[in-house]
Image (spheres, grey):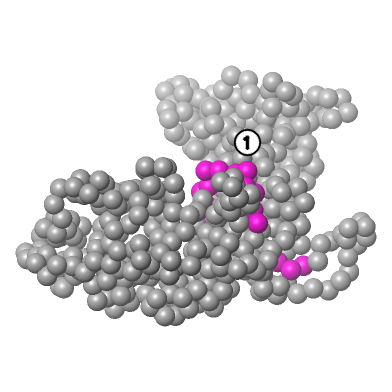
Amino acid sequence: MSMTRRVSAFICIVMSAVFLSSCSVVSADPETLIQAPSPTGELTDISEAFAKYADDYTLVFPTSGEHTSAYVVEDIDADGVSEAMVFYKLKSENYILHVNVLEQDGKRWRSVADYNTNGTDIDKVILSDLSGTGRKSIAVGIINSVDSSYHLEVLTFDGDGYIQCQMQNSYVDFACSDMDHDGREELVILCDEYSDNVVVKRVAVLCNFDESTSLIRDEIYSAEIDRGASDYSFAGVGSIEYGAAPTLTADGVQNTQASEVRTANALYFDAVKNEEYITEVIYFDEIAKSLTAPMYDTASGSNDLTVRSFGRRSMDINEDGEIEIPNDLLLPGSWYSNSVYATQWMQLQSDNSFIDVMTVYTDSENKFSMSFPDSWIDDNNVTVSHYQNTITFSLWDASANRRSTDLLEIRLVAQQSWDTNGSTASQYIRLGTKYGNVYLARILETDNKYSITEEQLVNGFRIK
Ligand SMILES: [Ca+2]
Ligand SMILES: [Ca+2]
Ligand SMILES: [Ca+2]
């Protein structure tokens, strides 16, 4: 399904040496040493120390990712003491984005290094142990507001007052994870290849660095992904198994070939495509020594396996360490103007097939969700209908094209009315109270293979 290959460093990643000259290296002025720590907390101490370093500055906040503050505090040189990074720009400089590093001596903070980027704003920041030494590289996704371009600068702080740019590259998204289980994180960049200013290919590129402070790249692998997508957001790292032979061969014959199943850390990127959503999955195949994007079909040049209209974000829905991709499940009995969907959470299997680990009906109007018991999933014969404040889950009789047995009813009753007349509804199981409503349920059928138990109801119901 997918094709990967090893590529030369020149296709997408530009050699860092070319760019080293454009990365400024600034040592801190000793006069920026400051006195008197503030007693009102670490961040106040840092901001006061920084204010003594810079004049007339504006703080810059990352717009996405894990760090969304203009201050990030973390031990980046592995000496056991945290540094602080400050993202800012100066009015006097036409708003060039800077990264400043402050160190602490006891409670006293001082600026020790400063770095001018080649942009004006921050998309996101990732701190990653790319060298495997415990020192954190600062991967800064930078926006240049002049031409709205995005590029990545990978910075290292050597503990002696220097911030160096080790690599610079355009991107559409990037993430870091230990992709090959060697205790050292790798950088994966999604980026475009151009020909005559036209994007001809989008690739995920894995950069594997060595242990040196200058972060020399050991190896580069790439895998083609869907170039028709935009607005990427990194959903996270999840464990996956890979390497099992597909259950059926191309001829439709049962495959009995033995194969070795391995485990990898896979990166999940959700993205927008034609006003719908897709997910790219990227992992390193240690058997084939190749980066793999199993959702992308090279024949069609497209990722069609994960297309859905409603489920935007992938996540580890059942908290088992593997990320699931949402899929729209059209419930039976739906028709064009009244389509009812549930979300199927799909987990990728080692033979590249999916299994549904959870199916959830979400009622956004009434602000609740209900996980289907397994018996409802197996035959996809349960439908949902609304009448006033009552939501009914029923079997759908496909041959008669109508609802048959009603299985479960969920009712919303105003809190006030419930408090006054609650006893009249005592046949209901009370599920919870929120937004001024009491959520009640009634199991309508107990002697059917599709009946839901009270335990399944209570465990599966959530107020959103
Ligand atoms: Ca430190
Ligand atoms: Ca690694
Ligand atoms: Ca999971």
Asked if ligand 3 lies within 8 A of label 1, the reply is: no
In terms of depth relative to the viewer, which is nearer, 77 or 40?
A: 77
Closer-to-camera residue (161/311):
161
> What residue occupies the far front of the structure in this picture?
196
Determine the residue positioned at 46% across, 75% down: 216
**Is the residue marked by circle 1 packed among few (<14), some (14-19), or many (20+) residues within 10 Å?**
few
- The residue lying at 68 percent from left, 66 percent from top is 5
**Percent from the top left, x then y, of residue 275?**
60, 34
The one nearer the camera, 193 or 359, is 193
Q: Is residue 114 left or right of residue 280?
A: left
Q: Main secondary structure of the magenta part?
A: strand
According to the image, label 1 marks what residue? 274
Q: Which residues are magenta?
A: 224-244
Residue 104 makes an appearance in the image: yes
Asked if the magenta segment contains residue 24, the reply would be: no
* Relative to 364, residue 313 above or below: below
Q: Position of residue 131 (x, y in %)?
A: 44, 76
Please report the residue visible at 59 percent of the width from the left and 59 percent of the height from the top.
Answer: 204
